Image (cartoon, helix red, strand yellow):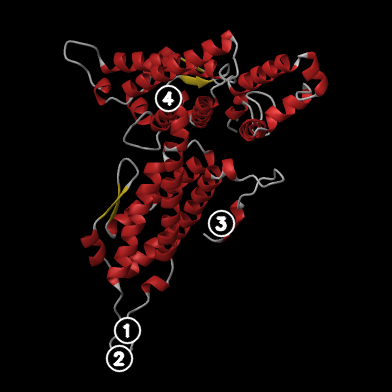
Amino acid sequence: MATNWSSFFGSSNSTSGFGSMSNLFSDYSAIRNGSYKHLLKSYYNLGNDSNTKSGSTGTSSNVTEKLIKERQNPVVSKEVAEANSALTKGVSDIKNSISALQKTSNYEDTTGGATAKSKVLAAVKDFASDYNNVVTNAKKSTNTAVTSNVASMMRSTSENKDALAEIGITVNNNGTITLDEKKLASADISKVQNLFSSDNKLSYGSTISNRITGAGFYGTSAGSEAKSTDGVSTRANTSSGASALKTAAKSLASGDLYAKVKDTDGKTTDQYDIDKIADTAKDFVKSYNDMFNAGKLSTNSGVSSNLSYISNTTKNNADALSKIGINVNKNGTLTFDAEKFKSADMSDVQKAFKNYGSSVATNASLVDYYMTTQANAANGYTSNAAYNVQSAANYITNA
C-alpha cells in the first residue's frame, strides 16, 4: 500500500501541519468583510465612552490595526523563512536534475569523453540529492501551494518504488530516497531512461517534472496570480476535454451510431453513415489528446489514476485501433488517419469500441468529476458551511 504523503503537509480536515483550510477561508472572509476588525473592536471595547474619556481609544485602535495587519501578513520564524527560501531553490535544482535524466545525449557514450554509464550515474546522484533537499525543506515550509505539489511528487515516487528499486533507489518511510550506487552501476541504463522518459507523458520522470513545474510556478512572485489564471485554465480544460471524450466514447460504443441509413424512399439500406461515424471518431481523438495534455499538470490523484487507467486500456487496444486508423503515439496521445478510418469496415469499428469505448467513457467521466470537484473547492461551501459537490456516483451512473 502506497504511503499517504499528503499527511506530511497537513489535511484539509486537520488543524495540525499547515492548518485547516476551513480556517483559512474563514479568516480570509472575516478580514475582507470587516467582521474580524469588528470582533477586535468589541474585544478591546473600542467606542466605549469610558475608553474615550480616559483617552485609551487611540491605544486600543493601534492594537487593533496592528493585529489586523499581522493577521493579513503573518510573520514566520527564521527557520520557516529559511525553509521557504531553500525550498524555492531546491525546486529549481531538482528541475535541472530531472531535465538531465531526460536528455537523450546523457545515455550515449561521448567519444574521448564520459561514458553513458558515468553520466547517468552522476545525473541520478544529483537527482537523489535534490529530491531529498526538496522533501526535507517542504516539511518545514509554509508555502502550501508548493508543498501540495511536493506531496504529489512523493506520492508518485511511492507508487513507482518497485521500478525505482530496480535501479538502486529505495523509498524511505520518511519520504526521502536512498541511492545504492553499486546497484545503479550494474543496472541497465535503458531502465533509467524508460523510467524518466519525456516521450511518455505518464512516465515517472514526466510525472515528477510536471509536479516540480507546478511547484516552481507557485513558488514565484506570480504565484497568487497563477492560481487565478493558469490553475483555473488547466482545470477547466481538463474537465472540458474529459466531458467531450466521455460523450464521443459513449457514442462510438453505442449501436445507435452504426444504424444503417435510409434511402430517399425511407427504406433501410445496408450502408453506414460513414461521415458521421468518422466525425465522432475524430472528436474522440481530439478530446482524448486535449484531456491528457491538460491533465498531466494536475496534482489530483483521482485525475492521475484515471488517466493512467485510460492510457493502459488504450495500449491494450492499440492493435485493434491501428487497423481502423487510430494510432497510439509513444507519448500516449492519439493520431487519426481519416482516410484509413473511412475505408475500414464499420462493423470492425463498432467491435473495436464496444468495450473499449465504454471503459474510456467511464474513466473520462471520473476525470471530469475529480477535476470539477477540485475546481469548485473554493466556492463549494453552502451558507451553513456544508460542502456541496456532486457525488462521484452520479458521474459513474451517467457515464
Q: Is 28 left or right of 335, judged from the image as shown?
A: right
Amino acid residing under circle 1: Lys
**Are the residues at dot 1 and dot 2 in contact (C-beta closer than 8 Å)?**
yes
Q: Position of residue 372 (x, y in %)?
A: 52, 48
Q: Which residue is drawn at 35% across and 16% down?
A: 123
Residue 334 in sight: yes
Tag 2 secondary structure = loop
Q: Nearer the viewer, mark 1 or mark 4?
A: 4
224 or 88: nearer the viewer: 224
Left or right of 267? Residue 139 is right
Q: Are marks 4 and 3 in contact (CB under 8 Å)?
A: no
Which-is-in-front pick, marks 4 and 2? 4
Q: Residue furthest top?
A: 78
Kind of residue at badge 3: Ile
User: Rounded to the nearest whole Å, what is the CA distance between mark 1 and mark 2?
Assistant: 8 Å
The residue labelled by disc 4 is 216
Label number found at residue 265: 2
**Of residues 277 and 166, which is closer to you in this image?**
277
Q: Position of residue 312 (x, y in %)?
A: 42, 46
The residues tagged by marks 1 and 3 sit, at their Cα atoms, a distance apart of 35 Å
Question: Mark 4 or 3 closer to N-term?
Answer: 4
Tag on residue 396?
A: 3
